Amino acid sequence: MINTKSPKPIVLGLGNPLFQDEGLGIHVIHRLMEGELDGRTELIDGGTDGLILLGTVEEARHLIVIDAIDGGFPPGTINEWEGCQIPLFAHGRLSPHQLGFQEVLALARMRGKFPEHMILFGVQSKSLDWGTDLTPEVAGSVPTVINLVHKQIENWLA
């Protein structure tokens, strides 16, 4: 069988940038696109595409997902989940569009094409009101998330 997994780590930003903190993943991805990771990784603005992202997930050997979450933490709190820790089907939702992405992950696993290494960096949102700017608490977490992504990529590429 030919290995069709991407040799480059894939970083996927999720969210809707029209609803304040819900756009976190998109803000982070666009900041990463301005830096040196762009040539060493595949950076994808996944928006709220849901099942359209199945191919991206299935082709990834190493996948980082960045998203806003609602887990009841203080706003701006960064959480990290790896591999099987990432809930495929949960009673509570971590983000407003999570059900679609959870289905993507579950389908990839059922088809035997789940990424070998996967990390979700989730940041607790404060507001999902109409607006294109992140709240100060969530905006303050962006440099740390970017640093975490850089460290993880370096770890995988070493």
Image (tube, rainbow, N blue to C red):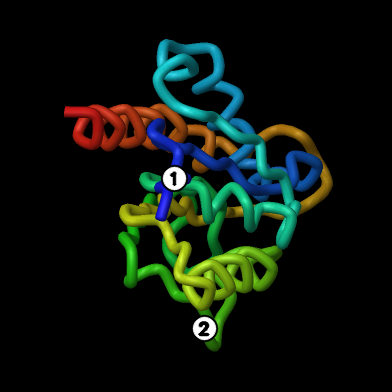
> In the displayed structure, would residue 60 be above or below residue 148?
below
Instruction: Select label 1 or label 2 by which is in front.
Output: 1
Q: From the viewer's side, name the closer residue of 61 and 101.
A: 61
Q: Position of residue 137 (x, y in %)?
A: 50, 41
Farthest residue, direction left:
158
Determine whether the residue tagged by mark 1 lies in a helix, strand or loop: loop
> Residue at 40% across / 31% down in the picture?
8
Image side of residue 144 versus residue 60, left or right: left
Q: Residues within 10 Å of mark 2 (few under 14, many from 20)?
A: few
- Residue depicted at x 70% and y 64%: 97
The spot of residue 54 in percent (x, y) is: 63, 57
Residue tagged by mark 1? Answer: 5
Position of the C terminus, as image quadrant, is: top left
Q: Residues within 10 Å of mark 1 (few under 14, many from 20)?
A: some
Q: Is residue 16 left or right of residue 154?
A: right
User: Identity of the amino acid at label 1?
Assistant: Lys
Quarter of the image holding residue 128?
Answer: bottom right
Q: Which mark is residue 75?
A: none
Quarter containing the N terminus: bottom left
Q: CA distance from mark 1 to mark 2?
A: 27 Å
- Residue at the disc numbered 2: 90
Q: In the rendered structure, which amino acid carries the disc numbered 2? A: Ala
Of pointers 1 and 2, the one earlier in the residue sequence: 1
Q: Residue furthest front?
A: 1
Q: So how many labels did they put on this image?
A: 2
- Figure check: 39 above or below 88: above
| Picture coordinates of residue 109, whole percent (x, y) | 47, 72
